[in-house]
Image: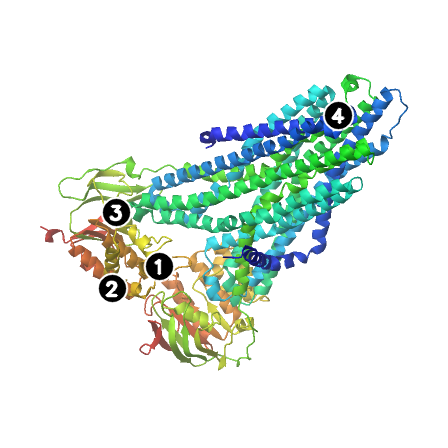
Amino acid sequence: MVDPPRVESARQATLITTFVPWCRLLARRRRRLMAGMALMALTLVSAIGLLALSGWFITASGLTGLLLAAGVAASLDVYVPGGGIRAFALTRTVSRYAERVYNHDTVLRLLADLRARLFGVLVELDERTLSRRRASDWLHRLTADIDSLDSLYLRLLAPPTVAALAILALGGFLAIWSPAAGMVVLLVLGTTWLWLTVGQALSGMAASRRQVSDLERLRSGLMEELQGLAELLAYGSLAAHRRRLEDVEARLQIDQRRLGRRVACGNALVGVAVGLTLVLVLWLAALARQTGSLSGPVMVMMPLAILAMNEALVGLPMAFTRLGATRAAAERLNALEEAKPGGDRNLEPLPPGPLAVTLEEVTLHYPGNLAPVLEAVCVDIRPGERVAITGVSGAGKSSLGGLLAGRLPPTRGRVLLGAVPLGWPVPGSLAQRVGLLTQRVDLFDDSLAANLRLAAPDATETRLWEALAMVDLADWAEALTAGLSTRVGEGGAQLSGGQARRLALARLWLRDPDLVILDEPFAGLDAETASHIAARLDGWLTGRTVITLVHQLGEAVDPPAIDRAMTLRAARLGETARYLS
Amino acid sequence: MAAGERRLLGLVTLSGVAAGTLTVVQMGLLAWLVAQFLVAERVPEDLWPAFIALVAVLPLRALAQWGQEVAGLEASLRIRRRARAALLDHLVLLGPVRLASRHSASLANQLVEQVEALDGYFARFLPQLRLAIGLPLLILAVVAWLDWLAALFLLLSAPLIPLFMALVGMGAERLNRDQFSAMARLSGHFIDRVRGITTLQLFDRGRDATAEVHAAAEDYRLLSMKTLRLAFLSSAVLEFFTSVAIAVVAIYVGFGLLGFITYGPSSALSLFSGLLVLLLAPEFFQPLRSLSQHYHDRAAALGAADGLVAVLNEVPDALHPEAHPPEPAIDEEIVSLTGVTVEHPGRGRVLGPIDLVVSPGEVLVLTGPSGAGKSTLLQLLAGFIGPSSGQWRRSTQPRFAWMDQRPLLILGSLADNLRLADPQASEARMRRALSRAGLDELLSELPEGLETRLGERGLGLSAGQAQRLALARIFLSASPLVLLDEPTASLDEDSEAWIIRALSELAEEGRTLVIATHHPALMAMADRRLALDEGGRLAAVTGESDRG
């Protein structure tokens, strides 16, 4: 038999460890968090005070009025309680407003922290981890995950803390007149609090954790149907596919229904628990008044104070039933951190000038793939030599480029640059010596100048224009009204594919590396432009080691002055016939 | 959308009213008990029935509350399911050709996220809207019965609330829009930087970019705090009125009970009525407060609904086959086109006029420069679109197989992917189909065989393997007509060779193949070759005379 408590505690431990890094991040803003909670508490105290004092005042005036009506000389100081009521009314409004503004400010600060922290993790990841995660739906999930964590404080930390403190304080306060009433508050509301937090969290954990992945499955199912509609219609399998989709949706809705019902139960429980406490406290207070240990107005004040506790507990069921979703988000983000390559980033200084490149028995095998991309590849490239490596798409050219630029660790074997073996992870300083023109050009939603200055932050404007001239873009840029300040749009959307590629080449030229790796340098360029640029590049490439990765040589325009050509086929690199330019 | 769930939504309102009524009862009992203790000087032991009643109200009220939430949830779930189905039906109706011009990832996102965004509106906001009018009236009636002057206080403050909220809301509305675009810009900035991380790494600029990400989020914070300061004012107004109403009622009742107020109904106030008025004052505002809490649900749903309605408003264009349905085929012919043209809205004529009869068992190859309308002709043969003019006939049972450059891979096992072509296919037939498509080697390497899962967290297929899987589907299906759009484009030599061999096997089986291709080996298979020119006209037909 399984021992349930132990299973439970193991789950707790992982739940806690999941959130530890995030709580640590929150703790950096400890003072703001405390101040925010204090404001929340002040709002709650004002709400309780307003109702309790009003009840006290009405009862006191009612009793005094009765005495006066009976002709008994009695008096009641109406100014202090009246002032108190007005003060509570005012602080409740003001502190509530201040609390909301202040805490949202805090949340936005936390959001900035979270994003920066995650980005810091992402820039340390290697190519293999990154390339699996570049799809746009992954990016959206990433931002959604960050957003769900930024509410950690406002939904899951502050409200239960304030509620717990309020229960303790109210219990203590009522115990002044009736210790039994204080105990009732602590017991009933304390137990309720425990259920609303821990109980609700555990009961909704599995279903809310599944939510994101179920939504994901629904999304990909819908995408299948929309993308593959032609085939589905052709084979008449649209209805069958739709049934699969409906199954996925039904599963999702079962969980959503379960979660919604749990939340509704929690909300109903709040009403019952507060009401029950109220009745019990009223009973105890009435008994205590009989013995004379408390007055009539206090007897009324006590249950009314409890009535206001509704406000402290009402948000908890919703937040905690869905804890699993926040947990899943945290787990996904934690997994990113774990993917970060460990170890020191050290590299012996590379020799100056063009770099020799050596691969020693290099094998590269992606996990999950059946066959290796590269198998026992050996190659020697002399400093200053220009090599072309050809192969069909998917043959592993880009992986080879990634290996040489230190972006991927080989599964076996060594990569040496200038006779220095590349350790793993490779330090960022390698970027000074090795330049890689990737097949996919990344441009940022920023100005032309900013995109160019990525390669050389201190480059003067003259230098930027030289770079543009190098790739035949200077005339085009001059014609732009905003010149170098022209924004290129999201991912360079304002530019054509060819312009983007040329801009990337200009960036590489600005960087001035000693080993240049060009992955399909002229893809998407018309033959005329390509031959212009090839001629210009030729001069610049002299005195550098150059490795060009292309689909095929001898097509439209070949990369300039190739000394040697090799072919990548079936995971092996073979020398092709000597290439004569 | 909500119309279909009127009963459930009615149930939500009913439960809400029941919960509100029970709250009034609860408060009434509480005030009565207090009055009995303090004014009538009765002892708790004598009043136990009232205590029991008070305890009994609690589960009833909880049940009503629960019912309100659960019925709202159910309505929302059903509405979302129906909305999604309606949208998907509509998109399917638009057909594969129209959908090809749309970004399917963002459409799928709409169908998931925007439909989910309707939740809060139907589950909470809409029912709460009715309750926000009904419940305060109920409470007002009770208070008026107790003390009309106190009711007047509440009544006077109530219309002020929407007024103030509207004033604040108008200012916040514009700011809100700015806020929305700022939020979108921030997410865009982050995604932009993440997408380009490789380049940042290649230039060793990770640290600077991280600082930039932080700075962008800080800018966003400063901007949005301006909005939020104003936006929170509207809830502060509500809060203020609730607090002031409690305070005013408390002081009014207190002074009335003391006999300080000599006019109006206050002389008739008792401890019971005074206390009950106080207890009901916050309840008067509670429905409005809940409504304002759900207000962002409304904003989210309205935004989503805009996007969804835009999808539903897309009507099938003139090329939809329903607009020009085919006549039944005569004799043996599969498809026959006479003087057919296809005009894309906005792009003019892309195909035709063309005359063509596709007969059983022939291999027809379509060639021509890109943009010559080869794909359009295939779509026409498949019946995905109809002609703009001319006559067309199709056999009434147009079973066909389709393969283009992006074969459909569904998240599921290898077998699931094969069964798309034939749900009843036996394991042996699936294995045979895979082996004919040249995937038997791959299959033998998979420990789970046909049950191996594809896609995310499963086996990743290369482009060539995916294409060969689509080929296996063709083998599995008995479809006499096979339509292929550039089946060998951008494939490795091995896959290319397999596909060419497989297609000639299909031709030998007697299936009719129509292939749009540039590949010489495929062109050589042709019984007839149709060359289209850039204007989509028939430039040349070769091999016509070879056929008897």
How many residues crowd around disc 2 within 10 Å: few (fewer than 14), some, or many (20 or more)? Answer: some
Q: Chain of mark 2?
A: B
Whole-percent x, y for residue B236 in the image: 69, 37
Among the 4 quarters of the image, the one containing residue A403 = bottom left
Name the N-terminal-most of marks 4 and 1: 4
**Residue type beneath disc 4:** Gln
Secondary structure under badge 1?
loop
- Please tell me the numbered disc located at residue B377: 3
**Disc 4 designates what residue?**
B36
Q: Are marks 4 and 3 on the same chain?
A: yes
- Counting residues from the start of the chain, the first of labels 2 and 1 encountered is 1
Residue at 48% x, 56% y is A492
Residue hosting label 2: B497
Q: Amino acid at mark 1?
A: Thr
Q: Chain of mark 4?
A: B
Q: Identify the residue position indicated by label 1 in the image.
A: B452
Q: Which quarter shows the C terminus of chain A?
A: bottom left
The residue nearer to you, when weighing A114 against A394, is: A114
